[in-house]
Amino acid sequence: MANVTNLNIEIDLELKAKADQLFNEMGMNLTTAVNVFVRQAVLEQAMPFTIHSVVPNTRIGKSSQERQAAMQEIRELLTGMDDVDLDQMKAERRATKFERND
């Protein structure tokens, strides 16, 4: 085994449980995920993701109902515009987001 050391960090219990579940679904544990993060940060000499001062979607409403109401309003505004596919736009936005973070 390579030269290793232990790292002790404090983390919210609920956040850790969610992270454990997420990384388990990706085939790794939290230790591996932290190592991936640190290696990528060192490689890029920066945080390996974009940090925003505003959490996405909070500008249109904090609750799920408010976001859904806003999306319904957008759909109504776009009624009659046959060439607009909101699901396709959403998929393209997700793909663009992942490309920027690669």
Image (tube, rainbow, N blue to C red):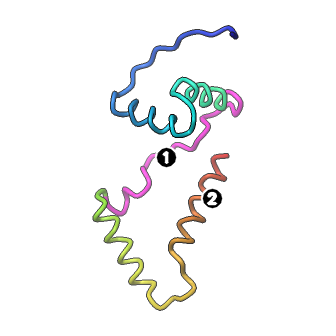
Q: What amino acid is found at the position of numbered circle 1 in the picture?
A: His
Q: Which residue is mark 1?
A: 52
* Magenta range: 42-61
SS category of the residue bearing label 1 = loop
What is the C-alpha distance between the residues marked 1 and 2? Answer: 16 Å
Q: Which residue is mark 2?
A: 96
- The residue that appears at 28% across and 64% down in the rendered structure is 65
- The residue that appears at 71% across and 30% down in the rendered structure is 43
- Measured from the top left, where is residue 3 in percent x and y? 67, 8
Let me know if residue 83 is in the magenta part. no
Let me know if residue 58 is in the magenta part. yes
Instruction: Determine whether 41 is above or below 73 in the image.
Output: above
Asked if the residue under mark 2 is in contact with the one under mark 1, i.e. CB atoms within 8 Å, the reply is no
- Measured from the top left, where is residue 76 in percent x and y? 38, 83
SS category of the residue bearing label 2 = helix
Quarter where residue 94 is shown: bottom right
Q: What amino acid is found at the position of numbered circle 2 in the picture?
A: Thr
Where is the N terminus found, in terms of image quarters?
A: top right
Q: Would residue 58 be found to the left or right of residue 91 on screen?
A: left
Instruction: Determine whether 58 is above or below 14 in the image.
Output: below
Magenta segment's dominant SS is loop
- Measured from the top left, where is residue 7 in percent x and y? 51, 14
Instruction: Determine whether 30 is above or below 90 in the image.
Output: above
- Measured from the top left, where is residue 4 in percent x and y? 63, 10
